[in-house]
């Protein structure tokens, strides 16, 4: 057997795959027994195959990931991605943003259960992790974005601060997800024709309402790409991202993608919770009340773009090949433009590579900077004809800011005197 310095996830998966272990079986073994369980399934024991320098398991209540590659907000409950650390389409798990309303949970996949109940199902269910893994799987490349991504720009750009985590441009990441379709579970439960609302409830009891929760309309819940996800970037979900199972709702704000999912309630009546009344609602003069909410409920994301640079950025004088990311819930990005003169004139950036499924798009541009202070702006267009607006109306909680951002860049002349 090859001597390995340590069993990281990808090395162990390659080792297991070569011995006939399926990806689904690998995820189950990792969830139920970790490295030792995988090695046992491969015919090895810890003493014969497991290195002695494995890092210890994280203590209960601690963060799974090292926050150092990210920007820490809210005493560690929110970790903002640095877009400049992502080069391709997929965000590495170590650099994936995190938004929590409580401490990340340490859950046992063997003991975990998902209940499906409510007055609009004929066959209430109590599902195990293995039950979910046994359903037909779907793989999606999909970005996940907090509703408050770019929130700080209400203050920086408009001079009017909104409440909430002051995300800059990194309340978003893009990943490769695998899961079962929520529709398949609802079908097994015998969802009724009069179903209206599907309530998703997490097991994080420190969150408001004894478990973070969000309501989906039945048509969104039944979309085949609304997933009960159990894998991110080829491995079982990290605990920060909802292990063992979370919801993945493409195109909808991050709060809809409930982590540590434990309960689904299907109702024949519209359901209202904190997260579609007091929170995740546009509150402001431009937003009349909707149902029991004081304004329009925030559901879909919107079209955005951002440069993958620190804020503010510092660059040496000369020609630079810059890149960034653009995305829209309404369709693929067809165009990204950039401006170096506050939007007076615009030039086309280059879209680089494919934009699969619900992924963001990567763009590149050439810019020559002379010594001094500059600001570059970008704006995106999608296949449905949506374009980032010149301005957006203020809302108290700072959701969905998407006007073009004047990204500050200080160019330093590094030449001799």
Image: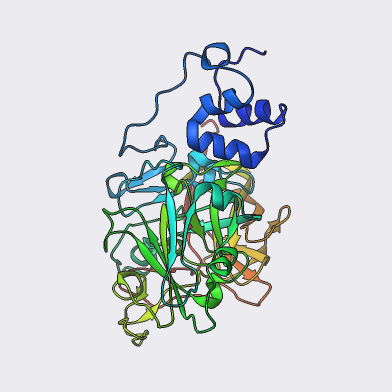
Position of residue 74 in the picture relative to residue 40 (left or right): left
Q: Is residue 158 above or below residue 42?
A: below
Residue in the picture at 68% in, 33% down: 21
- Establish if 15 lies above or below 149: above
* Residue at x 34% of width, y 82% of height: 295
- Please name whichever residue, 323 or 166, is drawn nearer the observer in this view of the structure: 166
Report if residue 253 is visible in the image.
yes
Q: State whether residue 339 is above or below residue 206.
A: below
x then y, percent, for residue 368: 62, 49
Residue 42 position in % (x across, y down):
64, 24
Q: How is the image coloured?
A: rainbow
Residue that appears at 63% across and 67% down? 224
122 vs 279, nearest the viewer: 122
Q: What count of labels does the image hold?
A: 0
The image position of residue 293, as x and y in percent, is: 32, 81
Instruction: Find residue 180 and report its image quarter.
Output: bottom right
> Is residue 307 at least partly visible in the picture?
no
Residue 33 appears at what percent x and percent y? 49, 31
The N terminus: image quadrant? top right
Q: Name, please, the residue furthest toward the front.
A: 123
């Amino acid at each position: 057997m090859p001597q390995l310095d340590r069993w990281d996830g990808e090395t162990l998966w390659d080792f297991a795959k070569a011995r006939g272990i399926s990806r689904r079986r690998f995820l189950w073994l990792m969830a139920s027994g970790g490295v030792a369980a995988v090695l046992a399934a491969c015919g090895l024991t810890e003493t014969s195959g497991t290195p002695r320098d494995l890092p210890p398991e994280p203590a209960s209540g601690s963060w799974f990931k090292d926050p150092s590659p990210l920007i820490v907000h809210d005493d560690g409950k929110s970790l903002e991605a640095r877009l400049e650390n992502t080069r391709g389409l997929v965000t590495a798990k170590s650099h994936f943003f995190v938004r929590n309303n409580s401490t990340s949970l340490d859950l046992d996949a063997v003991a975990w259960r998902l209940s499906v109940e409510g007055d609009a199902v004929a066959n209430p269910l109590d599902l195990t992790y293995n039950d979910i893994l046994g359903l037909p799987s779907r793989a999606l490349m999909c970005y996940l974005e907090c509703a408050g991504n770019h929130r700080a720009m209400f203050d920086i750009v408009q001079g009017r601060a909104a409440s909430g985590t002051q995300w800059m441009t990194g309340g978003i990441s893009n990943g490769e997800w695998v899961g079962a379709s929520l529709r398949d579970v609802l079908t097994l439960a015998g969802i009724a024709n009069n179903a209206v609302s599907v309530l998703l409830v997490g097991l994080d009891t420190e969150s408001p309402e004894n478990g973070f929760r969000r309501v989906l309309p039945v048509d969104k819940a039944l979309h085949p790409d609304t997933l009960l996800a159990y894998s991110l970037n080829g491995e079982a979900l990290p605990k920060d991202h909802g292990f063992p199972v979370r919801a993945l709702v493409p195109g909808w704000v991050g709060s809809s993608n409930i982590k540590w999912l434990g309960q689904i309630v299907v109702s024949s009546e519209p359901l209202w919770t904190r997260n579609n009344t007091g929170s995740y609602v546009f509150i402001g003069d431009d937003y009349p009340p909707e149902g029991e909410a004081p304004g329009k409920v925030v559901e879909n994301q919107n079209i955005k773009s951002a440069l993958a640079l620190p804020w503010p950025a510092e660059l040496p004088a000369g020609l630079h090949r810059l890149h960034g990311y653009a995305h829209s819930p309404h369709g693929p990005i067809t165009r990204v433009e950039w401006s170096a003169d506050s939007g007076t004139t615009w030039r086309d950036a280059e879209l680089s590579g494919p934009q699969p499924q619900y992924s963001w798009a990567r763009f590149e541009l050439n810019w020559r900077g002379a010594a001094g202070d500059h600001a570059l702006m970008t704006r995106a267009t999608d296949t449905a004809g949506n374009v980032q607006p010149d301005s957006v109306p203020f809302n108290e909680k700072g959701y969905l800011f998407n006007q073009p951002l004047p990204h500050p860049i200080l160019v330093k002349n590094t030449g001799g005197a």
